[in-house]
Amino acid sequence: MNEPVLARLHHLMTLREEVETLSSPVPWTPAADWTDDDAHLCLQLDVPGVDAESLEVQEDGETVTVAGQRPASERLLRGERPSGIFRRTLTFPEPVRPQSGQASLVHGVLTIRFEKRHPTISVPSSDLGREEQGE
């Protein structure tokens, strides 16, 4: 074969591989929020449709990794929601006590509460005024 034909054939094979990888399941990333609850840090991840049995949580020093899987619909006509395996590693915004995480899954939201190593102390503003007045 001549070189232009081989180059074109190679280009077609490359395009075919790219199209095939588009249809294969790819990892997805659930949205996450950190909230401060004075004595705890709370991590919330949106995982609707994920079976609780597939969820894994691992603490590792300054990070927490959450993994799981959402099954694909069998008779999907049109699809926008990702499916398959996800793995998300997040850094704690503040130091937490090791292995203190407690998880719950309610309405598709995974919430994990971690004990802070240094809890926030809230002082009501009415008490601040008394201290300034010498009471």
Image (spheres, rainbow, N blue to C red):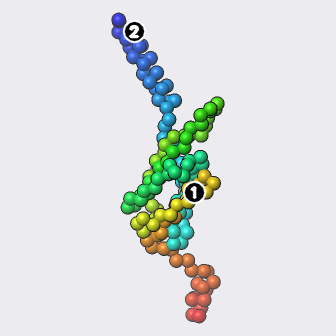
Q: Which residue is pictured at 55% across the width and 49% down the height?
A: 51
Q: Is residue 118 above or below residue 29?
A: below
Q: Which residue is pictured at 43% across the width and 71% down the height?
A: 117
Q: Quadrant of residue 97?
A: bottom left
* Horizontal arrangement in the rendering, residue 38 relative to residue 94 (left or right): right
Residue 23: percent from the left, percent from the top? 51, 29
Instruction: Return the mark for residue 84.
Output: none
Instruction: Return the mark for residue 105.
Output: 1
* Horizontal arrangement in the rendering, residue 86 relative to residue 132 (left or right): left
Q: Which residue is mark 2?
A: 5
Comparing 71 with 6, the one in front is 71
Residue 54: percent from the left, percent from the top? 50, 49
Among all residues in the image, which is located at the extreme front?
53
Q: Quadrant of residue 111?
A: bottom right
Question: Disc 1 or disc 2, which is closer to the eye?
Answer: 1
Spatial separation of the CA atoms under disc 1 and disc 2: 57 Å
Q: Which residue is pictured at 60% across the width and 80% down the height?
A: 124
In terms of secondary structure, where does tag 1 sit? strand
Q: Which residue is pictured at 47% across the width and 49% down the height?
A: 67
Comparing 125 with 98, the one in front is 98
Residue 88: percent from the left, percent from the top? 46, 50
* Horizontal arrangement in the rendering, residue 110 relative to residue 4 (left or right): right
